[in-house]
Image (cartoon, rainbow, N blue to C red):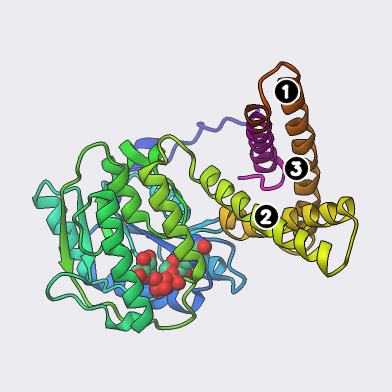
């Protein structure tokens, strides 16, 4: 047997006695390889004299961002990498980064140099010396600037900020900011209530806290992106709506269920259109037309759910096809459950309306539950 402790050159205590970082900067990345080194250099300069670490959370970027981060962490121990496989999503990446540090303060920042890193020192100072919970990098308070975002995006950002402020009753001007610093204790206390979908992690934190969080907004100018492209697309807008739903009624109904139901409602429309087309254009028999319409509606429901409801675990290529198959199969059983329950109730003299409704409810719950478990298995 080898005696591990036979030649102690260092005690565990002294070997592990480096000063822990006071600040962790969480940087979600997707295809940002070119930006990693310039960003860490800027952090190094602006945070001179502070104990910090940078945690990059990469979703297995095809451009090898994670490899670049790991290469850099061989040169600079303050740099760390979390590489997630088969996952996408800015908010969930940030949450995982936050849970991977023991630093007292946690900042969130984009990798593309659009956020002015010099603000970090001010944010740190504010949190150290006041009782604020969050310091927010803001483009919407006097002294801030958002023109680099580009016309339409800027408008969208402002309108959604205003809308979200109304719905959630939060006063923060730049609610869509992706640049802020928060006490880790606040995150720890509320992380289980985060919705974790989409881009709006700041909004998520503010809306999830049981008591109003104290915050300051520090102005900065949003800079043009350095290298690579923005990943925000139409999907981000949908994700925002989902977050808003989650934060307003989400405590009772899970967001995904709401999205699933909305897609299902849309599916009814698709079904009727397809049915009408099959009956008139193809001149098909009703059974045939109804079957075609069902298949088309199921396929469109699957595709839309895959795009939006489950964008974080979206299926592609072959997995799209096998996912489609399991979805159709599940919904087939759902239809059987639907008809079964409705028939039993109808036989029990419940009246056709109530029986049908019960059938639909059971069928839908089945479809939601089973496809959630099998078609879009999550992490
Ligand atoms: N891990 C991970 N996974 N990172 C991601 C993902 C993802 O799915 N999508 C984007 N990122 C990373 C990017 O690599 C970048 O570092 C950061 O998240 C922000 O993404 P961008 O694509 O640069 O966003 P943007 O510049 O268009 O939007 C910015 O402005 C918005 C305000 O309108 C961001 O700061 C948003 O957070 C902000 O809400
Ligand atoms: Mn950006």
Mark 3: few/some/many CA within 10 Å (<14, 14-19, 20+): many
Q: Secondary structure at mark 2?
A: helix
| Residue 178 position in % (x across, y down) | 33, 64
In the rendered image, which quarter is residue 283 located in?
Answer: bottom right
Instruction: State which tag comes first along the sequence, 1 or 2.
Output: 2
Any magenta on residue 95? no
Q: Nearer the viewer, residue 44 or 269?
A: 269
Q: Which residue is mark 2?
A: 301
Question: Main structural element of the magenta stretch: helix, strand or loop?
Answer: helix
Would you say 377 lies left or right of 317 here? left
> Where is residue 273 drawn, in percent x and y?
71, 62
Quadrant in which ligand 2 is drawn: bottom left
Q: Is mark 1 within 8 Å of ligand 1?
A: no
Q: Is residue 346 above or below residue 55?
A: above
Q: Quadrant of the C terminus?
A: top right
Per the image, the residue denoted by label 1 is: 346
How far is the residue under mark 1 from the one under mark 3? 22 Å
Q: Which mark is residue 31?
A: none
- The local crowd at label 2, few if under 14, some if 14 to 19, many if 20 or more residues have their Cα within 10 Å, is many
Is 377 contained in the magenta span?
Answer: yes
- Identified at 68% across, 29% down, the residue is 352
Q: Nearer the viewer, mark 1 or mark 3?
A: 1
The magenta region covers 357-378
Q: Residues within 10 Å of mark 1 (few under 14, many from 20)?
A: some
């Amino acid at each position: 047997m080898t005696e591990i402790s036979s030649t102690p050159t260092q005690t565990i205590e002294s070997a592990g006695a480096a000063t822990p970082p006071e600040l962790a900067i969480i940087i979600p990345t997707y295809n940002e390889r070119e930006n990693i080194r310039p960003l860490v250099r800027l952090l190094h300069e602006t945070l001179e004299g502070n104990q910090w670490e940078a945690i990059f959370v990469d979703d297995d970027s095809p451009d090898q961002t994670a490899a670049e981060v790991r290469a850099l962490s061989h040169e600079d121990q303050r740099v760390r990498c979390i590489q997630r496989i088969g996952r996408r999503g800015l908010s969930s990446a940030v949450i995982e980064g936050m849970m991977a540090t023991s630093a007292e303060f946690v900042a969130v920042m984009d990798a593309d140099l659009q956020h002015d890193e010099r603000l970090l020192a001010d944010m740190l100072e504010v949190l150290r010396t006041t009782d604020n919970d969050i310091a927010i990098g803001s483009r919407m308070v006097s002294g801030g600037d958002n023109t680099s975002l580009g016309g339409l995006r800027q408008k969208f950002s402002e309108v959604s900020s205003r809308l979200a402020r109304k719905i959630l009753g939060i006063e923060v001007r730049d609610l869509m900011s992706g640049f802020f610093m928060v006490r880790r204790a606040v995150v720890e206390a509320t992380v289980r209530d985060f919705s974790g979908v989409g881009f709006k992690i700041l909004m998520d934190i503010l809306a999830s806290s049981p008591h109003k969080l104290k915050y300051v907004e520090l102005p900065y100018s949003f800079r043009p992106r350095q290298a690579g492209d923005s990943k925000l697309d139409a999907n981000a807008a949908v994700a925002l709506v989902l977050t808003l739903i989650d934060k307003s009624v989400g405590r009772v109904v899970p967001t995904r269920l709401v999205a699933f139901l909305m897609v299902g409602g849309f599916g009814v429309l698709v079904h009727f259109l397809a049915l009408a087309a099959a009956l008139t254009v193809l001149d098909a028999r009703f059974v045939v037309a109804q079957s075609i319409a069902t298949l088309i509606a199921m396929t469109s429901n699957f595709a839309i759910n895959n795009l939006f409801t489950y964008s974080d675990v979206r299926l592609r290529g072959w997995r799209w096809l096998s996912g489609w198959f399991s979805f159709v199969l599940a919904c087939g059983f759902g239809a059987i459950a639907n008809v079964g329950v409705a028939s039993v109730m109808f036989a029990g003299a419940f009246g056709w309306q109530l029986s049908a409704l019960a059938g639909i409810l059971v069928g839908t719950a089945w479809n939601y539950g089973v496809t959630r478990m099998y078609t879009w298995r999550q992490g």
